[in-house]
Amino acid sequence: MKKKRDDVLLTGMFFLVGFSMVGCSGSRDSVQRDIVFPATYRGASSSAAVPADTVIAQLPYRSFFSDPALQTLIDTAVANNIDLQVALKNIDYAQQTVNSSKLGTLPALTLGGQGIRNYSSDNGVKKTPEEYIASASASWELDIWGKIRSRSQSALASYLKTGEAAKAVRTRLVADVAAGYYNLLMLDAQLALSKKNLDLADTTLKMIQLQYTAGQVNDLAIKQQEASRLSIAGSIPLIEQNILLQENALSTLCGTMPGPIHRSRSLHTKVTDNVSTGIPAAMLQNRPDVRAAEFAVRGAHADVNEVGAIFYPSIVITAQGGVSALKASEWFTVPGSLFGMLQGSLLQPLFQRGQLKANYEQSKIKRDQAELGFKQSVLKAVAEVSDALVRLEKIKAQEAIAEERAVTLRLAVTNAGMLFNSGMANYLEVIVVQGNSLAADLALADLRRQHLAVMAELYRSVGGGWR
């Protein structure tokens, strides 16, 4: 009769286990990436699209940026920037999570001692008044279904994702410092041009005043030149203000108090623009935010596996041993005081199946979201590189035209001055050509700044700056 009852219980247990396995079928399915990369970036020239060992993404920022002052500025930012330091602390935190997860497959060991003294009632059951116990116990959950292993894989993916996120912060930091530095050089150039043109306007004003004294021009000529001079003079405080604000912004990026920024005084900083960007598929190795999104997908898959494994029964082995005695003097009298216990348990959730199923479906939704996030990060990354390449090509064309225009107008200013002195040009022609020349020089300075800044952005968008 007892054997029949045991058979029924065993059959029922296997039925429950099998039922639970059906509930978690498919927990280890893996969604493959179905992204098809283009052969080249849109807007890439043949030299930029061909894979090479010297693609800019592989270059350390000290090799890409040749300006020593900029290199020092970036070094300071990398060492002191607060956002980057927070990101590095996140890596340390994630590392501790990984270390903790690695211990999940080890038994849980505990040591303990007890001293028991019972006071029974006169009418109750008589009990031993004292007992002294010292024991060690171990509990170990067998990871047959991979639940603990999946948890460890998820922690590792989270750690790697955090590391890539820190690299992404660094690439953005390097690009922002470079862009701010180039903007500072442009403002310096614009300030120098404005002061030079202010001196030229003063010279022209003196010449017109001499002609007015000689009766060659009227008072209107003086007023118009004075207005033109004041317009130039009024732009100088605004440029000086922008210089100070840009210096403060760069100081903040570098993690220092606001102060002057050391820099070279030339906008003609050399940055190689005949570059190889490699192929779009290289994004998976070079660009940190894309790699972070990929690790997020891995972590989401591991989470699905962990939640799916909860449907399976948990098998736990518990062992305990030690010494027990009714008198303290007999505590270490062995083997009489020794005791031991070995227990195996099989725990299968029964009435939580609906809740577990909902949790499992939620984990699959999060996995799908991670997959979509990865695809979105790849599309965004390829688009950013393509945008930078198009901007680089068009800015170079604009810069060539603007430089030719600026040279032409500078020559026109010289000729207008000589013609004005010889009486062959009037003051209006001189004022107009001087204003046009200043505007052309300021526009050329801005285009040179854009050229340098877009190179820094291209360097970041292909994944450079974290090495």
Image (cartoon, rainbow, N blue to C red):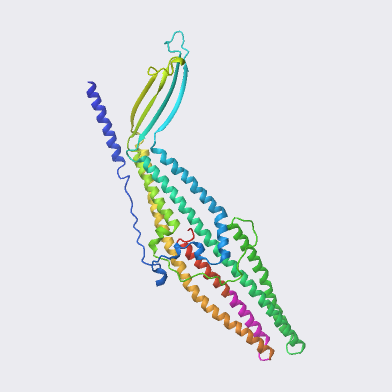
Q: Tell me what residue is drawn at x 47 percent, y 18 percent.
A: 116
Q: Tell me what residue is drawn at x 28 percent, y 31 percent.
A: 13
Residue 429 in magenta? yes
Q: Is residue 320 visible?
A: yes
Q: From the image, give the main secondary structure of the stretch colored magenta.
A: helix
* Residue nearest the observer in this picture, 117 or 430: 117
Give the side of residue 143 with respect to residue 89, left or right: left
Quadrant of residue 10 within the rendered picture:
top left
Q: Residue furthest right?
A: 213
Quadrant of residue 9 within the rendered picture:
top left
In the rendered view, tell whether residue 69 sits above or below residue 362: below
Give the side of residue 456 with respect to residue 190, left or right: left
Number of numbered discs overlaid on the protein picture? 0
Q: Residue furthest top?
A: 122
Which image quadrant: the N terminus?
top left
In the rendered view, tell whether residue 132 sits above or below residue 227: above
Residue 221 image point, x, y percent: 71, 84
* Residue nearest the observer in this picture, 218 or 287: 287
Residue 46 image point, x, y percent: 39, 72
Q: Is residue 362 visible?
A: no
**Magenta region:** 423-442
